C-alpha cells in the first residue's frame, strides 16, 4: 500500500497562516516550537492580535488599541502570554520591584464578561477614575490623600452612576436602577419559574476577565479567575445574585503582615423573569486582607504593581486551590480573633465579679 506523506514545505505560507490563525494561544505557541517555518509564521503579530481580540474583545475597542499602541508592550504575543494564565498563589517564588510611589495613571484595565461563550460586555478603564487627574495635578492635595488613605474600590459599573461602557451600545439603563446587558436571553420564563435558585447556572455560564495593563512597562496580568469562585443569592435584596471572581496576590510583609491580599472582582445582578435577561447593578474590583477588611488606595496600588510580577498558571484548579486556602486561613484568623475577644470578655467579667464580691465582703455590713 502506498502511503501518502504530507510535508509542511509543500504548503504555501498563506495556507499555513490560515490554519494557524484558527489555533488557540497555547497550541499556537506549541506549534511555533516544532520547526523554523511555523516559528516564523507564529511570530506574525497579526495572528496574536486577532487571537487577543477574540479572547478579550475589549482590546479591539478604539480606546484600548490606543492604550496598547502607546504603551511599552512588545507585541500582542506578549499581551496574550501575560494575560491568559492566572496568578499563582505562591509566597516564596516572587521578586517584586521596590516601588512605593505609584501613579494611578500608570494602569489601564480591560474588562470582558461572557455568558455561554458569548461576550456580552466589553469595557476599558484608563487609570483610576477621579484619581489620575488629581494625582498629576497635585499629588499632595486633600482629595488625593483621601483617595490613598480610604478603602480602594475600582468601579466599572454602578447603577447609581452609569456612564456607559465600550462604544456605548452594551448597556441599557432600567427604571429600577439595574443595567440590562443586551445579550441572548439567560433562561426562558418557564425555566426561571421552575428554579428559584440559579446559582449553578451562573457558575457554569458566566465568565469574567479583568486584565490590568502597566502602560509604562508594558506588562499585563489577569486579576480575575475567569470562572466564578462564589455565587450566592441575596434574598433580602429582591433576589440579587452576588458573584465573586478574583485571585490571591502574594505581597511583601512591609505591605501586609500576612503577605497575602485577595483581589475581589464583585458582580451583582438580577434576572428579569419575563425576558430572562441579566440585569447588572454593579461590577467592581477591590482588595482585601486576611481579615476581610478593605485595603486603602495607597497599598492597593502597590499590590496591583506586585500582581504584574507574580507567577502564573494555566491550571484553573491550582488557582482555585490557592483561593480556598486563603479563605480557610481567613476563617481561622477570624476564629482566633473571636476566641481572643471571648477570653478577654470573660476575663473582664471575672475581674468585675471579683471586685464586686470583695467590695461586698469588706465594705457592706454583715
Image (cartoon, rainbow, N blue to C red):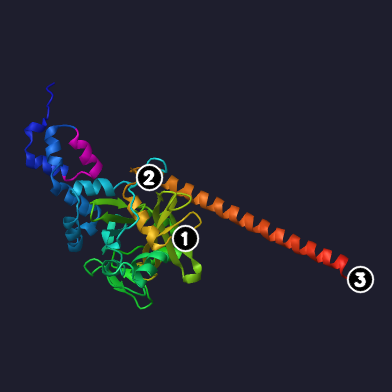
Query: Closer to the camera: disc 1 or disc 3?
Result: 3
The correct choice, above or below, for 27 with respect to 306 in the image is above
Quarter of the image for the C terminus: give it: bottom right
The correct choice, above or below, for 128 with respect to 14 in the image is below
Which residue is pictured at 20% across the width and 46% down the height? 77
234 drawn magenta: no
Query: Closer to the camera: disc 1 or disc 2?
Result: 2
Q: Are marks 1 and 2 in contact (CB under 8 Å)?
A: no
Q: Circle 1: is it few (<14), some (14-19), or many (20+) Cα within 10 Å? A: some
From the top left corner, tell me how far across and down residue 239 is, in percent: 46, 68
From the top left corner, tell me how far across and down residue 95 is, in percent: 35, 43
Q: Are marks 1 and 3 in contact (CB under 8 Å)?
A: no
Distance of label 1 from label 2 (alpha carbons)? 25 Å
* Quadrant in the picture for residue 277: bottom left
From the top left corner, tell me how far across and down residue 152 is, in percent: 39, 64
Task: Kindly identify which residue carries mark 3.
Answer: 365
Distance of label 1 from label 3 (alpha carbons)? 62 Å
Q: Secondary structure at mark 3?
A: loop
Work out whether mark 1 precedes mark 2 in sequence or the reverse, and give the earlier one. 2
Q: Which mark is residue 88?
A: 2
Q: Circle 2: is it few (<14), some (14-19), or many (20+) Cα within 10 Å? A: many
Q: Which residues are magenta?
A: 21-33
Distance of label 3 from label 2 (alpha carbons)? 71 Å
Work out whether mark 1 precedes mark 3 in sequence or the reverse, and give the earlier one. 1
The correct choice, above or below, for 1 with respect to 350 in the image is above
Task: Kindly identify which residue carries mark 1.
Answer: 232
Q: Secondary structure at mark 1?
A: strand
Of helix, strand and loop, which mostly describes the magenta segment? helix
Q: Which one is nearer the viewer's eye here, 141 or 25?
A: 141
Amino acid at each position: 500500500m502506498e502511503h501518502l506523506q504530507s510535508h509542511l514545505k509543500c504548503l504555501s505560507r498563506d495556507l499555513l497562516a490560515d490554519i494557524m490563525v484558527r489555533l488557540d494561544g497555547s497550541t499556537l505557541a506549541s506549534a511555533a516550537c516544532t520547526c523554523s517555518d511555523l516559528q516564523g509564521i507564529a511570530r506574525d503579530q497579526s495572528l496574536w492580535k486577532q487571537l487577543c481580540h477574540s479572547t478579550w474583545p475589549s482590546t479591539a475597542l478604539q480606546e484600548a488599541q490606543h492604550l496598547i499602541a502607546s504603551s511599552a508592550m512588545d507585541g500582542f504575543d506578549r499581551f496574550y502570554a501575560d494575560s491568559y494564565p492566572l496568578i499563582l498563589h505562591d509566597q516564596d517564588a516572587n521578586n517584586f520591584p521596590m516601588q512605593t510611589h505609584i501613579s494611578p495613571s500608570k494602569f489601564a484595565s480591560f474588562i470582558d464578561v461572557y455568558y455561554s461563550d458569548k461576550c456580552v460586555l466589553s469595557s476599558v478603564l484608563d487609570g483610576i477614575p477621579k484619581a489620575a487627574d488629581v494625582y498629576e495635578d497635585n499629588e499632595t492635595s486633600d482629595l488625593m490623600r483621601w483617595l490613598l488613605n480610604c478603602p480602594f474600590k475600582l468601579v466599572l459599573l454602578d447603577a447609581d452612576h452609569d456612564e456607559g461602557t465600550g462604544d456605548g451600545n452594551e448597556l441599557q439603563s432600567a427604571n429600577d436602577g439595574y443595567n440590562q446587558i443586551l445579550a441572548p436571553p439567560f433562561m426562558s420564563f418557564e425555566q426561571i419559574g421552575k428554579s428559584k435558585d440559579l446559582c449553578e447556572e451562573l457558575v457554569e455560564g458566566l465568565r469574567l476577565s479583568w486584565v490590568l495593563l502597566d502602560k509604562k512597562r508594558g506588562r499585563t496580568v489577569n486579576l480575575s479567575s475567569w470562572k466564578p469562585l462564589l455565587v450566592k443569592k441575596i434574598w433580602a435584596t429582591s433576589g440579587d445574585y452576588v458573584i465573586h471572581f478574583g485571585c490571591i496576590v502574594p505581597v511583601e510583609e512591609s505591605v501586609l503582615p500576612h503577605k497575602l491580599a485577595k483581589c475581589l472582582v464583585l458582580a451583582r445582578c438580577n434576572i428579569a423573569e419575563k425576558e430572562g435577561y441579566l440585569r447588572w447593578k454593579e461590577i467592581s474590583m477591590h482588595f482585601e486582607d486576611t481579615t476581610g477588611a478593605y485595603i486603602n488606595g495607597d497599598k492597593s496600588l502597590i499590590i496591583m504593581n506586585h500582581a504584574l510580577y507574580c507567577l502564573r498558571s494555566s491550571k484553573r484548579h491550582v488557582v482555585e486551590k490557592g483561593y480556598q486556602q486563603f479563605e480557610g486561613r481567613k476563617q481561622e484568623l477570624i476564629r482566633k480573633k473571636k476566641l481572643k475577644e471571648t477570653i478577654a470578655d470573660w476575663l473582664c467579667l471575672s475581674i468585675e465579679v471579683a471586685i464586686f464580691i470583695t467590695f461586698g465582703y469588706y465594705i457592706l455590713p454583715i
